[in-house]
Amino acid sequence: MILSMYGQAVLFLSTIIVGATIGLFYDVFRVFRKTAPHSTFAVQVEDLFFWIAATVGTFYFMLTRSYGEIRIFALLGVVLGIVLYFNTISKWIVKIFVVIVTFLKRVIASVVKIILLPLRIVLGWISPPVKAFTMKRRKDLRSVARYGKIRMKKTARNLFILRKKV
């Protein structure tokens, strides 16, 4: 379908927004990588999923907005949107979101500590008697094992003597 000049301008501006959205989506992965470090393999898998999602999203956008026609200016608009995003506000977005995510992690850790405090107190009361009981049983088991070794040695010696006599 033929687009008017106005339609082409709107499509170009829309593809710039799509490119900036792709950049923002990639920054989500960057924030996740900075707040929860992971292996090189995991980074590669994340990048693969990112590029698959970005390609499918861009294809769907092109399919719905430009009636399935891939236009060079539309692809240039996507690239321009990505470049503009990364060269303007990406650094600040990543820094702000890293601070927010780090703060939320600390808040959640504090809330979990507060929620688990009664359990920790109860376990603190229960732990010394349980530890004393298990230490006593370990000593008993050691003495039983020592007694068993002595009995085995005596039995082996008695068998040796019996074999000699026979």
Image (tube, rainbow, N blue to C red):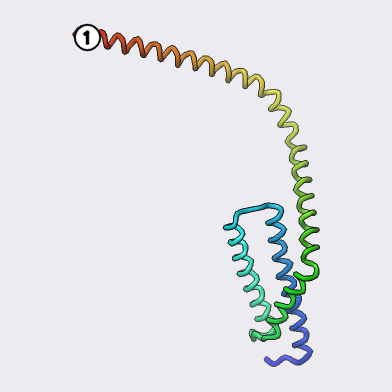
53 up-or-down from 113: above or below? below
How many marks do you count on the picture? 1
Q: Is residue 140 left or right of residue 124?
A: left
Q: Residue 119 lies in what quarter of the image?
A: top right
Q: Residue 125 lies in what quarter of the image?
A: top right
| Label 1 crowd bin: few (<14), some (14–19), many (20+), radius 10 Å | few
Tell me which amino acid carries mark 1.
Lys
Quickly name the residue at label 1. Answer: 164
41 up-or-down from 143: above or below? below
Q: Secondary structure at mark 1?
A: helix
Q: Is residue 103 left or right of residue 138?
A: right
Q: Residue 126 lies in what quarter of the image?
A: top right
Q: Residue at x 64, y 77 (%)?
A: 59
Give the x, y percent position of residue 112. 74, 41
Give the x, y percent position of residue 80. 73, 78
Toward the left, the furthest residue is 166
71 up-or-down from 29: above or below? below
Q: Residue at x 67, y 80 (%)?
A: 62
Of 16 and 7, the residue lying toward us? 16
Give the x, y percent position of residue 166. 19, 9
Quadrant (top left/top right/bottom left/bottom right) for the N terminus:
bottom right
Give the x, y percent position of residue 129. 65, 19
Q: Is residue 59 left or right of residue 97?
A: left
Toward the front, the furthest residue is 87
Toward the top, the furthest residue is 165
Q: Residue at x 80, y 70 (%)?
A: 88
Of 24 and 114, the residue lying toward us? 24
Q: Residue at x 77, y 84 (%)?
A: 10
